[in-house]
């Protein structure tokens, strides 16, 4: 099979006919429309998932927000005591090394 025959439709440097151009245009346009539709559907799915996860997070953090509001109200009333009963342990220390262990 020699592709250099004079009547071959796929010769090097030949221009495609009007039917081939029309088919290429229709395929290109349909692929472009399908890609655009897919991107819109993907964007809608991502938006719905984001709203659902945001609502779930908002619902799960309700007790924490309520506790923060109560602590804020307690501080605004002038009560310096914290709203929780656990003791807070604070401090700092300095460890001194004997002279033979110090870096020179």
Image: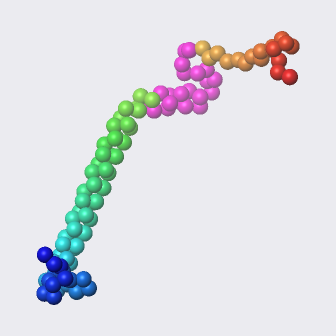
Q: Position of residue 27 (x, y in %)?
A: 18, 72
Q: Quadrant of the N terminus?
A: bottom left
Is residue 47 shown above or below 2? above
Q: Residue furthest front?
A: 2
Q: Quadrant of the C terminus?
A: top right
Residue 18 appears in view = no
Figure quadrant of residue 60: top left
Residue 36 appears in view = yes
Going by the image, does 79 lie left or right of 98? left
Numbered range of the magenta stretch? 65-86
Q: Residue at x 49, y 32 (%)?
A: 69
Q: Residue at x 50, y 30 (%)?
A: 68
Figure quadrant of residue 34: bottom left
Going by the image, does 64 lie left or right of 12? right
Is residue 65 shown above or below 1? above
Q: Residue at x 45, y 32 (%)?
A: 65
Is residue 1 shown above or below 68? below
Figure quadrant of residue 78: top right
Q: Is residue 96 magenta?
A: no
């Amino acid at each position: 099979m020699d592709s250099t025959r004079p009547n071959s439709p796929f010769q090097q440097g030949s221009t495609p006919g009007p039917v081939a151009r029309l088919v290429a245009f229709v395929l290109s346009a349909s692929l472009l429309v399908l890609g655009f539709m897919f991107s819109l559907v993907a964007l809608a799915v991502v938006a719905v998932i984001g709203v659902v996860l945001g609502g779930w997070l908002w619902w799960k953090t309700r007790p924490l927000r309520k506790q923060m509001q109560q602590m804020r109200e307690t501080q605004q009333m002038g009560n310096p005591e914290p709203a929780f009963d656990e003791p807070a342990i604070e401090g700092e220390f300095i460890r001194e090394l004997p002279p033979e262990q110090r870096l020179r």
